[in-house]
Amino acid sequence: MCRHAAWLGAARPLTWLIHEPEHGLLEQSYAPRRQRAGLINADGYGMGWYDAGRPEPVRYRRAVPIWTDANLPGLARAARSTCLLAAVRSATVGMPIEESATAPFADGTWLLSHNGRVARDAVRDLADGAESTCDAAWVAAAVFQRGRAGTGLADALADVVVRAGAKDPVARLNLLACDGASIAATVWGDTLFTHRIHDGVLVASEPLDDLPGWQAVPERSLLTVADGDVRVQPL
């Protein structure tokens, strides 16, 4: 399993997801509170953000525990955007521990993280190839392939999750993706929460703090966030 979080709203640094909250992704890497499988997320981490001067998002990925990277605090303070995504990884047994297997995966303007596990046979026929042999990379490749064919972000996530979930009934397919202007996420086997504040919306595997306002997204749901509007529909 893994933990991930995203922000859409007024410009914020990546510390907004990682270091600043009481239960941010740094703490969730070694002490997650609601994770349903696994006890620690020490098999890598990654983050992505959007810069107005670039057509594609910027990514930083490492195949080491997030707390061991001495460069991260300064970089996370400097990386500032209206759309952020970050993740810490607990690798599925048998999957490689390498940067190419670490979220966020990227294609064009899309960033994607997978929280869960799925049999690779359930996703291999949904994509032509993947960046890594890990299950999450194949999930990402399937989503991106649909995006290149013209499918929207939310619909691409929903199609891959429903198809893969039908082939692997015990799959956990919580996906979190963004394109710089919107967020889409699925709840399929683990937890997901949203928190709307005055200038944006947080989406995270589990609450980043104990403040009121966090709302659980129901199981087997598709979440979309755009222009301050939060919508949830069944998968």
Image (tube, rainbow, N blue to C red):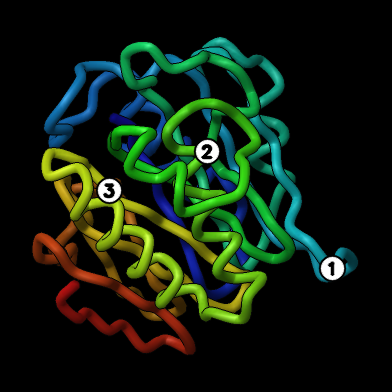
Residue found at x 42% / y 75%: 154
The residue that mark 3 highlights is 173
| Image location (x, y in percent) of residue 151 | 53, 79
The residue that mark 1 highlights is 55
Residue found at x 45% / y 48%: 125
Q: Quadrant of residue 136?
A: top left
Q: Nearer the viewer, mark 1 or mark 2?
A: 2
Q: Nearer the viewer, mark 1 or mark 3?
A: 3
Residue found at x 33% / y 69%: 158
| Image location (x, y in percent) of residue 122 | 32, 43
| Image location (x, y in percent) of residue 126 | 46, 54
Q: Quadrant of residue 109?
A: bottom right
213 versus 124 height, above or below: below
Viewer-proximal residue among 191 and 150: 150
Ranked by sequence position, the earlier of labels 1 and 3 is 1
The residue that mark 2 highlights is 137
* Helix, strand or loop status at disc 2: helix
153 versus 220 height, above or below: below
Q: Is residue 37 left or right of residue 128?
A: left
* Helix, strand or loop status at disc 1: loop
**Amino acid, disc 2:** Ala
Q: Are marks 1 and 2 in contact (CB under 8 Å)?
A: no
| Image location (x, y in percent) of residue 19 | 47, 36
Q: Residues within 10 Å of mark 3 (few under 14, many from 20)?
A: many
Residue farthest to the front, as pictured: 125
Q: Is residue 21 left or right of residue 235?
A: right
Viewer-proximal residue among 38 and 170: 170
Residue farthest to the right, as pictured: 53
